[in-house]
């Protein structure tokens, strides 16, 4: 079984190879979109737990449309019923944002 870091790295690689979310594409998201999307998936992970008690978390209940904070079209909102999968997606989005910010910092230091 892969650990959390391995799962996140594999998801990030999948996003690049299968979805086409390359570093160049990520560079276009300069209004914190990647962080907001990660926050939505992390909230979905928590909501998966709360849903067993019929509670809405952070404005989201599993099975509903994308949260208001979701930065893109609703069709791109693809939460899982598995909280671990949602956390992996959140982690991969955070990793993409860290890489984006590091590239900016590197370019500024040249």
Image: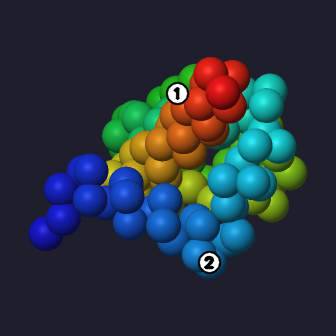
Viewer-side residue, 83 vs 51: 83
Q: Is residue 62 above or below residue 78?
A: above
Q: Is residue 67 left or right of residue 86?
A: right
Q: Is residue 4 above or below residue 34?
A: below
Q: Along the polypeptide, which appears first: circle 1 or circle 2?
A: 2
CA neighbours of label 2 inside 10 A, class few (<14), some (14 to 19), many (20+): few
Residue 72 bears which disc, if any? none
Q: Confirm whether residue 54 shows in the render.
A: no
> Quarter of the image containing the C terminus?
top right
Q: Is residue 38 left or right of residue 74?
A: left
Q: Is residue 40 left or right of residue 53?
A: right
Q: Position of residue 20 (x, y in %)?
A: 70, 70
Name the residue furthest front. Answer: 110
CA neighbours of label 1 inside 10 A, class few (<14), some (14 to 19), many (20+): some
Q: Position of residue 55 (x, y in %)?
A: 48, 30
Q: Is residue 28 above or below residue 79?
A: above
| Residue at numbered disc 2 | 18
Q: Position of residue 23 (x, y in %)?
A: 66, 53
> Number of marks in the image?
2
Residue 57 bears which disc, if any? 1
Q: Confirm whether residue 31 shows in the render.
A: yes
Tag in front: 1 or 2 = 2
Q: Quadrant of residue 106?
A: top right
Q: Is residue 51 left or right of residue 33?
A: left
Residue at image point 48% right, 67% down: 13
Residue at image point 51% right, 71% down: 14
Residue at image point 69% right, 23% down: 108
The answer for how far apart the CA atoms under marks 1 and 2 are is 30 Å
Viewer-side residue, 79 vs 98: 98
Q: Classify mark 2: helix, strand or loop.
A: helix
């Amino acid at each position: 079984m892969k650990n959390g870091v391995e799962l996140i790295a594999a998801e990030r690689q999948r996003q690049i190879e299968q979805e086409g979310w390359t570093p160049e594409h990520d560079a276009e998201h300069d209004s914190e979109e990647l962080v907001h999307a990660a926050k939505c998936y992390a909230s979905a992970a928590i909501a998966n737990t709360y849903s067993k008690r019929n509670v809405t978390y952070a404005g989201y209940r599993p099975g509903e449309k994308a949260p208001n904070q979701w930065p893109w079209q609703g069709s791109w909102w693809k939460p899982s019923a598995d909280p671990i999968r949602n956390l992996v997606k959140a982690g991969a989005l955070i990793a993409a944002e860290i890489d984006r910010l590091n590239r900016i910092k590197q370019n500024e230091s040249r």
